[in-house]
Amino acid sequence: METSSNSTNSSLFQWLGLIEDYDQPSTSTLPPVITLLSSVLTKMIQKNEKPFHTRRNKFRDEEITMFHGSRAPSMNIQRYTERVHRYARCSPACFVAAFVYIVRYLERPGATSMTRRLTSLNVHRLLITSILVAAKFLDRKCYNNAYYAKIGGVSTEEMNRLERTFLFDLDFRLNITAEMFEKHCLMLQRQTVPCGSGRLRTALEEMTCGCQAI
C-alpha cells in the first residue's frame, strides 16, 4: 500500500513534471520545473544585484571566477533554461539536481562573500555546467561536452574547464538523498504559492540568505 508520504511525493513530482501522467494526453508544453527554476534563479539574481544598482559599474567589486563572463548575455535566464531543456533532452529531474548543485556551489567551504553571489554574469555558465553534470550523473544517456558547449554558447575547451572546475569546487559531492531532492522540489513549488503571513519567509528567501551568508 502506498503511504501518505509517498503519495504526497508522487503528486509533487508529477506537478513539477518530473514523472509522466499516463492518464493525461502528452503535450509539448514545458514541464513546470523549467519555468520555476528560471524564476527562482532570476529572483536570486535580482536580490543579489539590488545593492549595486545605484553604482555606475554594479559589477566593479565582484570577484571573478571561471563562471563569470565579461558582460551579461543578451539571452535572459528564462529563455536560456528553456533552450537547454529543448536541446539537451535530459530528464526533468536533472533541473532539480542542477538546482541542488548550484546551491552547493554557492555554499561551498572557502567561498568568499562575493563568490557566493549568483549574478547575471555567472548564472548562465553555472546553469549549463550543473545540468551537464546532473545529466551525466542521473540519466542513462547523455550528450557529450561538445554538444552541451553548443547549447550553452561556449567552446568545447571552456565547457571542459567549467565541468572540471565545478566538480572540484563541489568536492565531487554529486549524490543527492531523497530528502534533499524533495526539499529542493518544495523550494521550487512554493514560489507559486503566495505567503500572506509576515511571520513566514518563503523557501527562496531562506535559501538566498544562506547563499549570501557574509
Image: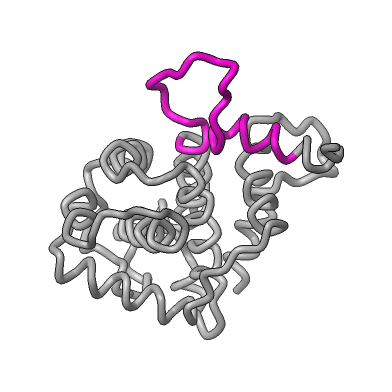
- Answer left or right for 211 relative to 118: right
Residue furthest bottom in the image: 110
- Answer left or right for 71 relative to 32: left
Q: Where is residue 97 in the image (x, y as percent from the top left)?
A: 52, 55
Q: Which residue is drawn at 29% across and 73% down?
A: 66
- Against 22, is 196 above or below? below
- Against 195, is 152 above or below? below
- Is residue 58 in view from this perspective? no
In front: 165, or 135?
Answer: 135
Q: What stretch is highlighted in magenta?
A: 9-34
In front: 6, or 47?
Answer: 6
In front: 173, or 187?
Answer: 173
Q: Residue at x 71, y 29 (%)?
A: 194
- Answer left or right for 174 relative to 151: right
Residue 213 placement: quadrant: bottom right
Residue furthest front in the image: 1
Residue 81 placement: quadrant: top left
Q: Position of residue 153 (x, y in %)?
A: 18, 53
**Colour scheme used in the picture?**
one colour
Q: Position of residue 132 (x, y in %)?
A: 35, 59
Q: Does the magenta stretch include residue 54?
A: no
- Is residue 11 in view from this perspective? yes
Q: Where is residue 174 in the image (x, y as percent from the top left)?
A: 51, 70
Quadrant that contains the C terminus: bottom right
Q: Which residue is drawn at 63% across and 51% down?
A: 184
Quadrant that contains the N terminus: top right
Q: Which residue is drawn at 42% across and 18% down?
A: 27
Q: Is residue 26 magenta?
A: yes
